[in-house]
Image: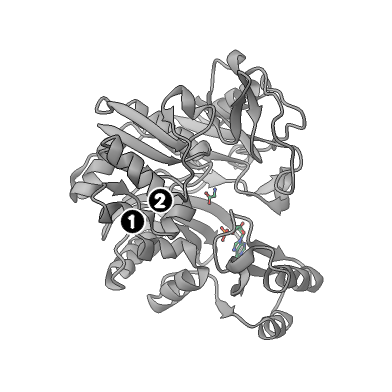
């Protein structure tokens, strides 16, 4: 088969890596890809939002399947666009991707169908939002309605922080149009867990659980990022809690989307808080997580391409999907300054010395034959082992060999799993 993956991050490198292992792959392309992806697939210089060029390429190259990685093109309806032109594509259509693209929509859906989530109110008027914030207990959580690269959420501990955050989103337009509406919600406490599932309508095939580290500094300090590291499994979360989340959140949500006339087909990512009252939804994403994918796909024993094809053929429910018992830990190496501004184009050395880990490129490019930094999150180093301790040891030992100016990583990825 001839397959085109859309995207350029660590998630897409992991997807390309998994697909490249399928015996059914004849030719693999990635648009636009990065320097790491280029080692496994032919990279094509077309951006994720150039639908016309992507469709023309898919037609010309007789692509059998397009796999869409990121949220932006999904929210903009790339799957509808390709399907209308007779091109098979994996991922939710626009009306289903809205579960990620609009927090107001997803909160309303959860409320309507009584699916556990934080209590909330939505506002498009700044003065009303401000008055509400002032009337609520602290901490309080403020979210821009639309997509904001994982950074549109403010967990305010003080009223000053809350007011400043609200002003930034609604008045100063920090997230552009994404911030013209906000969701203001109750602060939840507990362990966080990412639970992704392969979904086709009401058929839900959960993956193994994982945990992300959103804040930039050790001890969950500093601003939120796209994710600084992940691990899977999450040994301190009992299987019964995962099962409860599947039954009370993931399956009812898939069913609700069907009832709403927006059947979800693709990867549904539930961000969960395991509270004392049981699992509650923090957010949904309409795609694989980044960097969750980097620890999930190395544990997937079944051919990813078979899962995708079964979804498109309507036979996902019949497929045997197997996961390995081994653990995986991903440590993100980020540019100095991320998630604020950071330099690009800095040479990366030591990649060839890495022997005992998978390295998924996130923001890299090739310049004059050299691999250089090209994004906030630069690389994801994935260690594997019999347990989290072993996988973590491998990830950090190998990450140490890689160097670039300003390199920053958290040193406490997966430590919660060791303390438990
Ligand atoms: P989101 O982009 O919605 O996943 O939010 C980013 C991060 O903000 C989450 O991973 C949580 O750590 C935190 N967060 C979001 N909503 C809440 C909430 N209601 N209570 C506590 N923390 C939250
Ligand atoms: N790791 C968080 C996300 O992919 O949204």
Label disc, if present, on residue 81 of the rendered structure? 1
Which of the 4 quarters of the picture holds residue 26? top left
Measure the C-alpha gap from mark 1 to mark 2. 7 Å
| Identity of the residue furthest to the right in this view | 160
Q: According to the image, label 2 marks what residue? A: 51
- Which class describes the residues within 10 Å of circle 2: few (<14), some (14-19), or many (20+)? some
In which quadrant of the rendered image does the N terminus lie?
top left
- Which class describes the residues within 10 Å of circle 1: few (<14), some (14-19), or many (20+)? some
Q: Residue at x 72, y 53 (%)?
A: 223
Return the x and y of residue 158 as percentages of the image width and height: 79, 69
Colour treatment of the image: one colour
Task: Tell me the element at label 2.
Answer: helix
Above or below — where is 77 with respect to 169? Answer: above
Of labels 1 and 2, earlier in sequence is 2
Return the x and y of residue 51 as percentages of the image width and height: 40, 51
Task: Tell me the element at label 1.
Answer: helix
Q: State whether residue 321 appears in this view.
A: no
Above or below — where is 358 with respect to 215? Answer: above
In which quadrant of the rendered image does the C terminus lie?
top right
Q: Which residue is drawn at 41% across and 48% down?
A: 239
**Front residue (pair 155, 290):** 290
In screen coordinates, is 285 left or right of 256? right
């Amino acid at each position: 088969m001839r397959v085109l993956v859309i995207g350029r991050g660590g998630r897409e490198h992991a997807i390309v890596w998994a697909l490249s292992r399928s015996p059914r792959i004849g030719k693999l392309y990635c648009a636009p890809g990065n320097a790491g992806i280029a080692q496994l697939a032919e990279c094509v210089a077309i951006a994720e939002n150039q639908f016309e060029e992507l469709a023309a390429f898919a037609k010309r190259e007789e692509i059998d399947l397009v796999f869409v990685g990121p949220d932006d093109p999904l929210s903009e309806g790339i799957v509808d666009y390709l399907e209308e032109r007779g091109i098979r594509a994996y991922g939710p259509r626009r009306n289903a991707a809205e579960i990620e693209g609009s927090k107001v929509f997803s909160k309303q859906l959860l409320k309507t169908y009584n699916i556990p989530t934080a209590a909330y109110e939505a506002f498009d008027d700044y003065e009303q939002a401000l008055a509400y914030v002032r009337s609520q207990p602290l901490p309080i959580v403020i979210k821009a309605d639309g997509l904001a690269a994982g950074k549109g959420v403010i967990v305010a501990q003080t009223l000053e922080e809350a007011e400043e955050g609200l002003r930034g989103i609604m008045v100063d337009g920090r997230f552009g149009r994404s911030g013209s509406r906000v969701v203001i919600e109750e602060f939840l406490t507990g362990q966080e867990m990412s639970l992704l599932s392969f979904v086709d309508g009401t058929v839900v095939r959960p993956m193994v659980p994982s945990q992300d580290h959103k804040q930039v500094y050790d001890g969950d300090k500093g601003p939120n990022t796209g994710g600084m590291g992940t691990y899977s499994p999450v040994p301190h979360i009992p299987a019964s809690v995962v099962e409860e989340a599947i039954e009370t959140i993931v399956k009812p949500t898939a069913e609700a989307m069907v009832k709403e006339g927006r059947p979800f087909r693709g990867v549904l990512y539930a961000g969960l808080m395991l509270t004392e009252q049981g699992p509650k939804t923090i957010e949904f994403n309409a795609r694989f997580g980044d960097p969750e994918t980097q620890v999930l796909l190395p544990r997937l024993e079944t051919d990813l391409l078979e899962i995708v094809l079964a979804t498109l053929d309507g036979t996902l429910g019949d497929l045997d999907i197997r996961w390995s018992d081994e653990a995986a830990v991903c440590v993100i190496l980020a540019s100095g300054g991320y998630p604020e501004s950071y330099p690009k184009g800095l040479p990366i050395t030591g990649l060839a010395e890495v022997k005992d880990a998978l390295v998924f490129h996130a923001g890299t490019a090739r310049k004059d034959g050299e691999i250089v930094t090209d994004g906030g999150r630069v690389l994801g180093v994935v260690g594997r082992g019999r347990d989290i301790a072993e996988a973590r040891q491998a990830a950090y030992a190998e990450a140490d060999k890689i160097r670039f100016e300003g390199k920053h990583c958290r040193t406490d990825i997966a430590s919660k799993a060791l303390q438990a």
